Image (spheres, rainbow, N blue to C red):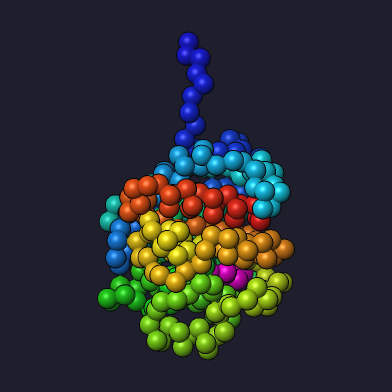
């Protein structure tokens, strides 16, 4: 009989029992619509391995991962090359999580995976709002004729939650029409108090890791200079901890573009700190 101990490929600090967990971590290894550099499909697995290099305790939030009570369900499997079927698989599984009275924490994968999450969650909460961290607006109606694109995810999500229920942080790249959309609906945040209009809403937090400056996060599909530093991002998390967060995801790490592994380590810590405010 083997005696071990054996390495665990799940996220550190997780509750191995789905039934007694409050939050379900779901790997979403899909990058079928990326417009520049692919590779975010490899992020969930690499993030899990890197998680074991972190402490389970967050000094910033004075909280332990065991206090979060999350279960790592592993990665979903997608039919290669079929975007619509892949999105359907995500929506069905996230819907099951909420039917069971739990909340989702998605790990992408490209940013389009957020759309089916929002579709599923909106079936359970009518007062849903989105807090969107990103370098890019993601407000196109389509990209080169394709409606289902990671560059259109927030525009499509706005049709579900309504544009005035979206707040965007760190945006520094997009088309003129997208910036006009942000001005029309006052979605762009410059200071913490810009989020206060969402205080009475159910919040889904979506973090595209390219919100961080490439000096911090080079391992992403579409790096954009002029981004947030790590502690700036966590400052926003601190402000959000008093909000009613009912779901979240972290997307767009493409680990193979940073051979040092630093980007993966940063992504992993972003995930740990975001879990602490849920």
Q: In the image as oriented, which residue stretches furthest toward the front?
A: 215
- Front in this rendered view, residue 20 or 241: 241
The image position of residue 214, as x and y in percent, is 41, 63
- Front in this rendered view, residue 83 or 47: 47
The image position of residue 22, as x and y in percent, is 65, 47
Residue 239 visible, this angle: yes
The image position of residue 111, as x and y in percent, is 42, 63
In the image, what residue occupies the spot 58% across and 77% down? Answer: 189
Q: Number of labelled discs?
A: 0
In the image, what residue occupies the spot 54% across and 60% down? Answer: 230
The image position of residue 180, as x and y in percent, is 46, 88
Does the magenta run of residues contain 274? no
In the image, what residue occupies the spot 50% across and 18% down? Answer: 4
- Look at the image and give the residue range highlighted in magenta: 128-132
Residue 76 visible, this angle: no
In the image, what residue occupies the spot 63% across and 76% down? Answer: 191
Q: In the image as oriented, which residue stretches furthest toward the top?
A: 1
**Quadrant housing the C terminus:** bottom right
* Residue 108 drawn above or below residue 10: below
Q: Give left or right: position of 7 versus 34.
A: right
Q: Could you say which quadrant of the image residue 176 lies in?
A: bottom left
Magenta span dominant secondary structure: strand
């Amino acid at each position: 009989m083997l005696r071990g101990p054996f390495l665990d490929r799940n996220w550190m600090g997780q509750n191995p029992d789905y039934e007694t967990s409050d939050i379900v971590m779901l790997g979403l290894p899909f990058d079928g619509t990326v417009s520049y550099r692919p590779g975010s499909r490899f992020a969930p697995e690499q993030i899990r391995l890197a998680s074991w290099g972190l402490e389970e305790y967050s000094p910033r939030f004075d909280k332990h991962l065991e206090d979060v009570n999350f279960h790592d369900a592993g990665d979903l499997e997608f039919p290669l090359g079929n975007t619509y079927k892949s999105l359907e698989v995500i929506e069905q599984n996230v819907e099951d999580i909420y039917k069971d009275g739990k909340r989702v924490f998605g790990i992408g994968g490209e940013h389009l995976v957020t759309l089916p999450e929002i579709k599923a969650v909106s079936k359970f909460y009518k007062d849903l709002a989105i807090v969107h961290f990103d370098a890019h607006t993601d407000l196109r109606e389509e990209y080169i004729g394709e409606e289902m694109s990671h560059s259109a995810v927030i525009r499509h999500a706005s049709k579900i939650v309504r544009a005035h229920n979206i707040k965007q942080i760190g945006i520094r790249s997009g088309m003129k029409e997208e910036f006009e959309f942000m001005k029309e609906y006052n979605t762009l945040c410059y200071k913490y108090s810009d989020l206060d209009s969402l205080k009475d809403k159910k919040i889904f937090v979506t973090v595209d890791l390219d919100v961080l400056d490439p000096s911090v996060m080079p391992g992403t599909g579409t790096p954009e200079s002029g981004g947030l530093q790590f502690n700036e991002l966590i400052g926003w998390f601190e402000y959000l901890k008093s909000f009613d967060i009912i779901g979240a995801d972290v997307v767009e790490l493409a680990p193979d573009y940073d051979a040092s592994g630093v980007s993966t380590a940063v992504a992993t810590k972003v995930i740990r700190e975001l879990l602490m405010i849920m």
